[in-house]
Image (cartoon, rainbow, N blue to C red):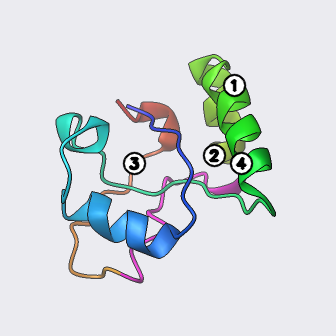
């Protein structure tokens, strides 16, 4: 399962998501890895980009992930080393 969203504080958001502090998509589908991130200068651009990405097909969403993170390495793993490592190719993500 792929989740697309934005946050004004990525570190806080990853922490909340990793430890399932809130019920929702992340908790329901047990999303575990941060596979891709992109910095935007304004929240307006971030919302526009999120809306654009959500309109893409799954294959089109996976392409930029595989270009930057071919092996599906959790980009937040260094910050949270005790979390279970799950290194699958992004194209196999459920």
Closest to the observer, 80 or 53 = 53
Residue 85's x, y, as percent? 28, 66
Question: How many residues crowd around disc 1 within 10 Å: few (fewer than 14), some, or many (20 or more)?
Answer: few
Residue behind mark 4: 46
Residue 53's x, y, as percent? 67, 30
Question: How many residues crowd around disc 2 within 10 Å: few (fewer than 14), some, or many (20 or more)?
Answer: some
Q: Please give the label number shown on residue 42.
A: none
Residue drawn 71% across the image and 53% down it: 43
Residue 79's x, y, as percent? 40, 83
For marks 1 and 2 on the same chain, the one whose residue lies earlier in the sequence:
1
Residue behind mark 2: 65
Residue drawn 76% across the image and 47% down it: 44
CA gap between label 2 and label 4 equals: 17 Å
Q: Is residue 24 above or below residue 16?
A: above
Closest to the observer, 3 or 61 = 3
In this rendering, the label closer to the viewer, 2 or 4: 4
Looking at the rendered image, the quarter that the N terminus falls into is top left
CA gap between label 3 and label 2 equals: 12 Å
For marks 1 and 3 on the same chain, the one whose residue lies earlier in the sequence:
1
Q: Which SS class for mark 1?
A: helix
Residue behind mark 1: 60
For marks 2 and 4 on the same chain, the one whose residue lies earlier in the sequence:
4
């Amino acid at each position: 399962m792929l989740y697309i969203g934005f946050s004004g504080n990525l570190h806080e958001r990853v922490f909340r998501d990793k430890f399932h502090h809130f019920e929702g998509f992340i908790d329901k589908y047990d999303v575990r890895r941060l596979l891709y991130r992109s910095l935007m200068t304004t929240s307006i651009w971030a919302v526009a980009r999120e809306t654009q990405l959500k309109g893409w097909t799954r294959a089109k969403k996976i392409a930029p992930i595989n270009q930057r993170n071919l092996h599906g390495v959790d980009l937040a793993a260094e910050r949270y080393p005790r979390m279970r490592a799950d290194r699958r190719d992004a194209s196999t993500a459920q």
